[in-house]
Amino acid sequence: MSLEVKNITKTFTTSSGDVTVLKDVSFTISNGEFVSIIGKSGSGKSTLLSILGALDSPTSGSIVVDDANIEKLKGHEQTKYRAKKIGFVFQQYNLVPNLTALENVVLALEFGGYPAASRVDRATALLAAVGIEDDQLTRRPSRLSGGQQQRVSIARALANEPAYILADEPTGNLDSVTGKKIFSLLHDLSRKQNTTIVVVTHDLDIAGKTDKTFTLVDGKITTKTRS
Amino acid sequence: MNALTRGVKNTLRSPVRSGAIILMFAISIALIVSMLVARSSVLAKINEVKSTAGTNITIRPAGTMGGMGGGDPLTAAQLNTITSTSHISSTIMTLTDQLSSDNTNLTSSLEFGGFGRAQRETTNSSSESSTSENKSTETPRTPGITITGTTDVNSASTDGSSLSISSGKTIDASGSDTVALVGTDLATKNNLSVGSTFTAYSKTFTVSGIYNTGNRFTDSGIIMPLKTLQTITDQAGVVSSVVAKVDSSDNVAATVASLKSSLGSAADITSEIERAESSVSSLQGIASLAMTGVIAAAVAGAAIVLLAMIMVVRERRKEIGVMKAIGGTDGKVVGQFIIEGLTLTVFGAVIGMVLGILVSGPMTTSLVSSQNTSSTNRTSQQLSGVRTSTNSSEAPGANFIRGGFNQIRDNASQVTASLTPNILLIAAGVTIFIALIGTAIPAWLTARVRPAEVLRTE
Ligand SMILES: Nc1ncnc2c1ncn2[C@@H]1O[C@H](COP(=O)(O)OP(=O)(O)OP(=O)(O)O)[C@@H](O)[C@H]1O
Ligand SMILES: [Mg+2]
């Protein structure tokens, strides 16, 4: 059981020509590992994460997750993969604007096939774990701060107990205290529930506490493993 | 929480935009309903007028104006042609004549109208300087008295029902006795009662009965058997108008055509059905106008929902991408947007139907009355034209014409808006059609949004 990236290339075709963001990237992440991806802005961190999460497909290469070739799955199988196996924390939070904090988490539970009767209870508990409580539950994203939206987004990613959490700058908008709380929450998940966690971060302190760090430079990756 | 409640909630959570879409859509549904109501009411009236039109055909010598004379009377040979035409089950023949004071001892109960008086005044002022005093002393010239010789006295009644005899009894119109029915005005003027006698063309007539139609001109006339009038005026076999009854309404058109070809230009032939049709032709115009309105409103309604939904989907591409990125299936995401579209449509349709039912009454009335002002004006002009152009009383034919024109006015005023279950069904059908168009295309657009859309920053 692992996540294996083999010779991934990603080229975006734009009006001003082709841009190759990822060049022949390969690496392996074992089950329950906590890894970080660092790199300059625009180096392709979010692009790599979205390919791992089957939000986008690579131009060439393959991603094998638990023995399945993700990029070769049919549309509805990819949807199922995203719903059940992946918890995605977006850099821009991407909450559904018309839904309250609670409803956003309930929505993910619905998509993951969680029993309807206990969705609200579970969503409330998940939000409490990231510090969203009381009247914040019934607020829509436009009436939550950036940090609060980020925490709702994390709760939503955890909703279906995914085997893989892909988090794009999950602590980028949080103060250091809250950031540390979120980080230890993710750390616990990897240690106690054997969840594989991939975080994109600018914070070298955080990166230093992960099992492995991938650094993206000019579309190529270098790996640093800690023991 | 599921796609249904999310879809409904989403429409309610942007009340201004949803409200605007619902209102626009409701207005087009209201237009559809009211136009359908107007159309079906008008069609119902048209059918009613057509079905109640009798099967009578009126044949007059060519060039006559409302039976006022002019043109050569119909000859015995022409009458033979008419009676031997197939499908004609019975005929009523009429001859009219004007009795002048040389030919009778009776005095007309009519006086000249404004036109006649004005003419007299100009004549007078040229012969002697007229003052207001000598105007009052002048003896009024007496107009003629109209005699109608007929094979059916009821043909003289104004409205097609039987002639009302206020005293005495009716005459045998098929005979040739010197008996007559006298109009109530003429009887009063000349102190005639049942059993009284008067002279016409040197023959002595006995008053058999007094009739009363309520029409001043008709009630100043005399009705006698056709043969009697033909004999005393030396016009054996001559007739000035024939009303032929056709055995069934299906044969009227064919019979009119066959009479036209056999009588040629010698006769004017009109049927009640033709008259009914021309009287409802403006209504027919309204019906097709209303149908155009229905189609236009349906197209507008469909366009509103379609554009609104396309706008909604475009605006929310990112949100759609998010739902797909966190594992929402196409079915769930598309379903939610279909429900949003349907929610708008249902609200719009319900409001629109209520609005449509409320405005359909006034709408029908205003459509019908604006279309009919022109024909009503024409009617009264023609009527006054008839009156002023003759120095004699109106003949029964004129009554008949007036009856026809009154009919037109009545047709228009009697169109009442009626909402039938059928209309609601059609309106519901149109609404469903619009809802399908308004959701299917946005749904297709929604399905095509890729989850990578979520990464776009706007
Ligand atoms: N859909 C796209 N079309 C064209 N170019 C794209 C697209 N998505 C990303 N890029 C480009 O690919 C490069 C990598 O983008 P990406 O978002 O992965 O960077 P990043 O490392 O996450 O940066 P940041 O730290 O600022 O979030 C950038 O130059 C970006 O402009
Ligand atoms: Mg990024």
Image (tube, grey):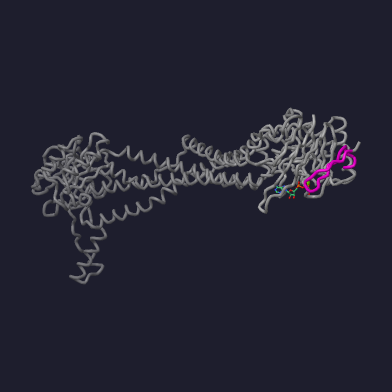
**Image position of B235 with respect to B326: above or below:** below
Q: Give the range drawn in magenta.
A: A207-225
Image check: B323 left or right of B282?
Answer: right
Q: To which quarter of the image does residue B80 belong?
A: top left
In this rendering, is residue B76 above or below A3?
A: below
The reply to whether residue A143 is visible in this rendering is no
Is residue A215 inside the magenta stretch?
yes
* Left or right of B439 on screen, residue B179: left
Residue extending furthest toward the bottom: B129
Identified at 85% across, 47% down, the residue is A202
Residue B201 in percent (x, y) is at: 9, 49
User: What is the magenta segment's predominant secondary structure?
Assistant: strand
- In depth, the one of A52 and B246 nearer the eye is A52
Q: Nearer the viewer, residue A59 or B322?
A: A59
Check if residue B204 falls in the magenta segment: no
Q: Nearer the viewer, residue A44 or A178?
A: A44
Q: Where is residue B430 in the image (x, y as percent from the top left)?
A: 50, 39
Q: Give the residue at the far right of this rendering.
A: A227
Judged left or right of residue B235, residue B65 is: right
Q: Which quadrant is the N terminus of chain B positioned in?
A: top right
Q: Is residue B19 visible?
A: yes
Q: How many marks on residues?
A: 0
Report which quarter residue B115 is drawn in: bottom left
Nearer to the camera, A16 or B163: A16
Using the image, determine if residue A146 lies above or below residue B326. below
